Image (cartoon, rainbow, N blue to C red):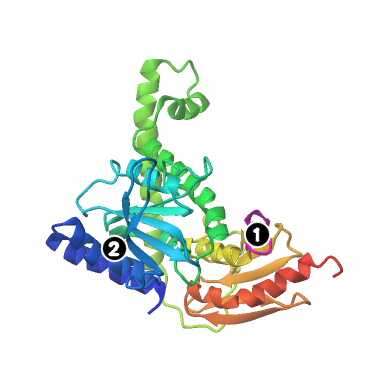
Amino acid sequence: MDFKDQIKQFSERVSKLKDNIHTEEATKNAFIMPFLQILGYDVFNPMEVVPEFICDIGIKKGEKIDYAIFRDGAPIVLVECKHWKQKLDVHDGQLLRYFHVSKAKFSMLTNGLIFRFYTDLVEPNKMDEKPFLEFNIEEIKDGQIEQLKEFHKAYFDVDNIYQSASELKYIYEIRQLVNQEFHEPNDEFVKYFARQVYPSVVTSKVLEAFRFLVKRTITNIINDTINDRLKSAISKPDSPIQEEPTPVVLSPGANTQEREIVTTQEELEGFYIVRSLLRQKVPSSRITHRDALSYFAIFLDDNNRKPLCRLYLNNSKKYIGIFDSEKKESKVEIQTIDDIYKFGSELDSTIEIYLDTKK
């Protein structure tokens, strides 16, 4: 069973058992310890997972955090747990104090349903007020599972996680802002649209009228997008399994929708995997992507003369295209995007070709 399946199974377990969990200790035993085991850590090995880890805070001695995950004799992740019915917002201050006196670079606050991961992006050795990764295990998305996988014992790399934490943190905050504007658009957001379509001065009365219109328009756009995709899925005939992805051929009269390239969540997840595999070689900003009608291409420095790989994920069979020193592509079938992790050495060899200035 791969990591994604384990998380999905754990999600179902939490939903089934939570109503029978009545104490914080029961939450730890039923949810937190199994979760740490899924991440690859032996919860019964005191060299890997230390329960009731002591964090002396100033003159306060013997302060304890629920768990500390260790590697090479030092804590790498602090874990603070609460009962599944408790809200986490009132407990992050406690974790912040522990983080400040610990050598751990990451911390996790959870009640077994909500999981929040923190680091020190804003100020060194001081835990950020906002998490860089947060999810509800009962509603966890595939992209969040890929992000969580970086905390697995087999893949854990402090530098890699820290580099991606900044991006994830801002994506999370932007997502929150966008979601807020979609539900309750503020004055500036409404004015941006009103000034472009309203022929006169945007008074307070006009502003309120447009607030309703903007909110309604956003809702309509979202509904139309969902309906279009549902119609497309329903009307698309079943196609036979093919060894090669079928190229899309557009006639001169094809409309805009037929020409549109849609980047899927799975393609982006594949990109994040490739980028994480190559971070030891180059900064993550140098790993870029472009989507095409029949494949998803990943480059070095956004240069089409420096292809790193291609992902073919939108047909019955999935493939990864690997390039050799002559930039000749070899396509290998994969079962899931997790299989991309198996091609780390091949990707390393490809990027070395471009990093070697003699070639």
The magenta segment is 279-286
The numbered mark at residue 287 is 1
Q: Position of residue 331 (x, y in %)?
A: 62, 80
> Disc 1 and disc 2: Cα gap in Å?
35 Å
Which residue type does callout 1 highlight? Ile
Residue pointed to by mark 2: 32
Horizontally, is 339 left or right of 190 in the view?
Answer: right
Instruction: Decide: few, some or many residues near mark 2? Use Cα within 10 Å; few <14, some 14-19, many ≥20.
Output: many
Q: Position of residue 162 (x, y in %)?
A: 54, 54
User: What residue sits 29% from the left and 69% below the top?
Assistant: 34
Dot 2: what SS? helix
Whether residue 313 is situated above or below residue 331 in the rendered picture: above
Instruction: Answer whether residue 15 is magenta in the image.
Output: no
Please say whether residue 34 is visible from this viewpoint: yes
Position above or below: 315 against 229: below
Residue drawn 67% across the image and 72% down it: 348
